[in-house]
Amino acid sequence: MDAEIRFQPSGRSIKVRKGTTLLDAARRAGVHIATRCGGKASCFMCKVQVLPGSKLLPVGDIESRKLAGLEEQGMRLSCQARANGNCEVEIPPDPLRAAVARQLARQQEDDLW
Ligand code: FES
């Protein structure tokens, strides 16, 4: 094991071998990252924000095409990004869960009236 991957906002971390994808590391750590394509770089659901100081292998052609420049803002596809040392990544809120939470909050406000 030669890379420690820390996931935010949970703070969970796991030690993995260099070359492990962030998605595989997350699964081993029990951290949920939404996916639909099974890690084939086509659904775009597994994107994560890589925090400064993280050591990842460079973005490949397929991932680069999919990200279309977002990699310059620290975004990576967790199914394609491979650890090359210690990393810390922020997992954005699941859009579907966030939408459901907003709807429930609105409904609770309406019920108060
Ligand atoms: S799992 Fe679908 S793009 Fe990464």
Image (spheres, rainbow, N blue to C red):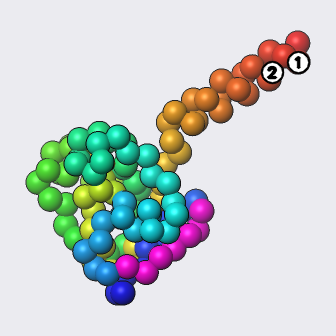
User: Which is more toward the observer, 95 or 54?
Assistant: 95
Quadrant (top left/top right/bottom left/bottom right) for the C terminus: top right
Q: Residue at x 40, y 54 (%)?
A: 48
Please name the residue that numbered disc 2 is placed on: 109
Asked whether, in this view, residue 60 is left or right of residue 101, the answer is: left
Residue 17 location, quadrant: bottom left
At which x and y percent is residue 45? 37, 42
Residue furthest left in the image: 61
The picture places residue 16, in percent across and down from the top left corner, at 37, 79
Q: Residue at x 27, y 62 (%)?
A: 81
Tag count: 2
Q: Is residue 75 visible?
A: yes
Q: CA distance from mark 2 to mark 1?
A: 5 Å
Residue 45: mark in rendering:
none
Residue, disc 1: 112
List x then y, in percent, for residue 46.
37, 49
Q: Amino acid at mark 2?
A: Glu
Under mark 1, the amino acid is Leu
Residue 11 within the magenta-colored segment of the rendering? yes
Q: At 14% from the left edge and 50% from the top edge, which residue is drawn?
A: 62
Determine if residue 74 is in view: no
**For the residue with label 1, is its CB less than 8 Å from the closest atom of ligand 1?**
no
Q: Quick check: 84 above or below 36?
A: below
Magenta span: 10-16
